[in-house]
Image (cartoon, helix red, strand yellow):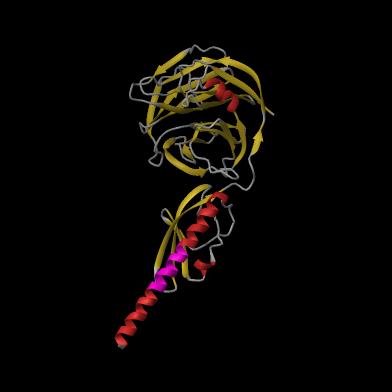
C-alpha cells in the first residue's frame, strides 16, 4: 500500500513538473512572438515572463557558436536585424528546456524619408540586365548579368552604345562591381569567384575566390579602404582590397522597425553606403559604421514606369555624378539623374 502511494505521488509530481515546464515554454513562446514584431534596440533588457524567471535556475541564450547569460541586447553578441537564437533554461527541478526564438534588433532612430527631384533622363539599353553600375564623371561602367549574356561595358552617359565591351564566358553570371584606382573589381553570382580588370581597356587582369561566408555575389562598392560586398542577406561584408578573399568585418543592416535583407547593388558616397533592396523600389542610405539605415528613397513611380509588368525588371542601379544620384534598373530603357533635396 505504501509503495502504491509513493508511486502515485511520483506520477503526480512528474505530471505537475511536465505541466509546469509546458507553461514555461508556452509563456516564453508567446513572449517571443509578441516581441519579434516590436523588436528591440541595443541596450534593451529582455524582460522574460514571470513563469520563466520564477522557475529557472539559469537562463542562457545560444546564438551560433556563442552563448551568454546576459539578458541585455548587447552589440557584442547580437547584430542588427534578425537573430535566430535558442533559450536554454535549467529549471529549479534540474531539467533543461530549449526554446527557439528570433530576436529582431532595430535601429534606434527612424529612417529619414529622402526626397529628390529628377533633373535629367538618359537612354539605357533595355537589353542590359544591370547588376553593377558605376560612374566617373560622364563615363559609365556597367556589369550586366545572366548566364550566356554577362558582360562588363563602358559608355558615355547619354549614349546607349558602349565604347568598350568585355564579354564573359557562357557559364559566368556577372554581378556587382567597384572601381579601385585604375582597376575594376567584379563579383559573380554563384561561380564563387571575382575578377579584376583594367579600368581603361576592361581586359581581365586576375581573379580571386570569394570568401566562404559569401554564398552568392550580389553587390559591390569601395569605401576608400575596403571593398564592400552583399550576398542577398542583411550583411555588408568589408573585404581586404589587397586580398578580396578575406573578410575584414561584417556589418548587419536594419531600420527603425524593419530588418532589411536582400541588400543588393551598392554605392559608397560621402561617408554613406547606398543600397537597393531586391524586389523593392527603394534605396537605403546606410551608416557603414553601425549598419543603421538612416534614410530611404522611394522610387516606386520610376520602377512602375520601367518594369513593363515584369517583376524581374527591378530597380538595380545606383551611381553618383558628383552629388547627383544616377538611378536605373534591370532592362530599364532610361537612366535618371536626381538631385537629393
Q: Residue furthest bottom?
A: 2
| Above or below, 60 relative to 328 | below
Residue placed at 30% from the left, 85% from the top? 3
Q: Position of residue 88 (x, y in %)?
A: 43, 62
| Above or below, 57 relative to 198 | below
Q: Say if residue 142 shows up in the picture.
A: yes
**The C terminus is located in which quarter?**
top right
Q: Position of residue 166 (x, y in %)?
A: 41, 18
Magenta-drawn segment: 15-25
Magenta residues, dominant SS class: helix
Q: Is 23 contained in the magenta span?
A: yes
Q: Residue furthest right?
A: 341
Q: Position of residue 78 (x, y in %)?
A: 51, 52
126 to the left or right of 137? left
Q: Is 302 contained in the magenta span?
A: no
Please state which of residues 119 and 207 is positioned toward the viewer in this rendering. 119
The part of the image, by quadrant, that contains residue 172 is top left
Please state which of residues 204 and 301 is positioned toward the viewer in this rendering. 301
Please state which of residues 277 and 52 is positioned toward the viewer in this rendering. 52
**The N terminus is located in which quarter?**
bottom left
The count of marks equals 0
| Above or below, 224 relative to 257 | above
Q: Position of residue 335 (x, y in %)?
A: 56, 19
Residue placed at 45% from the left, 62% from the top? 25
Q: Say if residue 76 shows up in the picture.
A: no
Residue placed at 53% from the left, 43% from the top? 259
| Above or below, 44 relative to 123 | below
Amino acid at each position: 500500500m505504501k509503495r502504491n502511494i509513493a508511486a502515485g505521488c511520483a506520477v503526480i509530481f512528474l505530471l505537475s513538473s511536465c505541466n509546469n515546464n509546458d507553461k514555461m515554454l508556452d509563456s516564453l513562446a508567446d513572449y517571443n512572438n509578441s516581441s519579434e514584431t516590436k523588436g528591440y534596440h541595443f541596450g534593451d533588457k529582455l524582460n522574460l515572463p514571470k513563469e520563466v524567471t520564477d522557475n529557472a535556475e539559469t537562463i542562457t541564450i545560444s546564438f551560433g557558436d556563442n552563448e551568454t547569460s546576459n539578458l541585455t541586447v548587447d552589440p557584442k553578441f547580437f547584430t542588427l536585424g534578425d537573430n535566430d537564437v535558442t533559450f536554454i533554461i535549467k529549471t529549479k527541478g534540474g531539467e533543461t528546456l530549449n526554446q527557439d526564438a528570433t530576436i529582431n534588433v532595430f535601429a534606434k532612430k527612424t529612417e529619414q524619408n529622402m526626397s529628390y527631384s529628377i533633373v535629367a533622363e538618359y537612354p539605357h539599353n533595355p537589353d542590359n540586365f544591370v547588376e553593377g553600375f558605376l560612374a566617373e564623371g560622364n563615363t559609365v561602367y556597367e556589369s550586366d548579368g545572366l548566364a550566356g549574356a554577362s558582360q562588363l561595358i563602358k559608355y558615355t552617359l547619354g549614349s546607349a552604345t558602349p565604347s568598350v565591351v568585355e564579354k564573359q564566358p557562357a557559364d559566368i553570371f556577372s554581378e556587382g562591381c567597384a572601381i579601385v584606382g585604375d582597376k575594376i573589381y567584379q563579383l559573380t553570382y554563384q561561380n564563387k569567384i571575382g575578377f579584376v580588370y583594367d579600368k581603361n581597356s576592361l581586359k581581365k587582369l586576375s581573379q580571386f575566390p570569394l570568401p566562404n561566408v559569401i554564398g552568392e555575389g550580389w553587390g559591390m562598392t569601395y569605401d576608400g579602404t575596403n571593398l564592400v560586398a552583399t550576398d542577398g542577406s542583411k550583411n555588408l561584408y568589408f573585404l581586404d582590397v589587397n586580398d578580396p578573399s578575406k573578410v575584414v568585418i561584417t556589418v548587419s543592416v536594419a531600420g527603425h522597425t524593419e530588418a532589411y535583407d536582400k541588400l543588393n547593388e551598392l554605392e559608397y558616397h560621402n561617408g554613406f553606403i547606398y543600397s537597393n533592396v531586391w524586389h523593392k523600389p527603394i534605396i537605403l542610405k546606410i551608416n557603414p559604421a553601425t549598419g543603421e539605415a538612416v534614410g530611404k528613397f522611394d522610387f516606386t513611380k520610376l520602377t512602375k514606369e520601367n518594369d513593363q509588368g515584369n517583376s524581374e525588371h527591378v530597380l538595380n542601379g545606383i551611381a553618383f555624378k558628383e552629388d547627383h544620384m544616377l538611378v536605373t534598373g534591370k532592362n530599364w530603357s532610361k537612366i535618371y539623374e536626381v538631385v537629393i533635396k
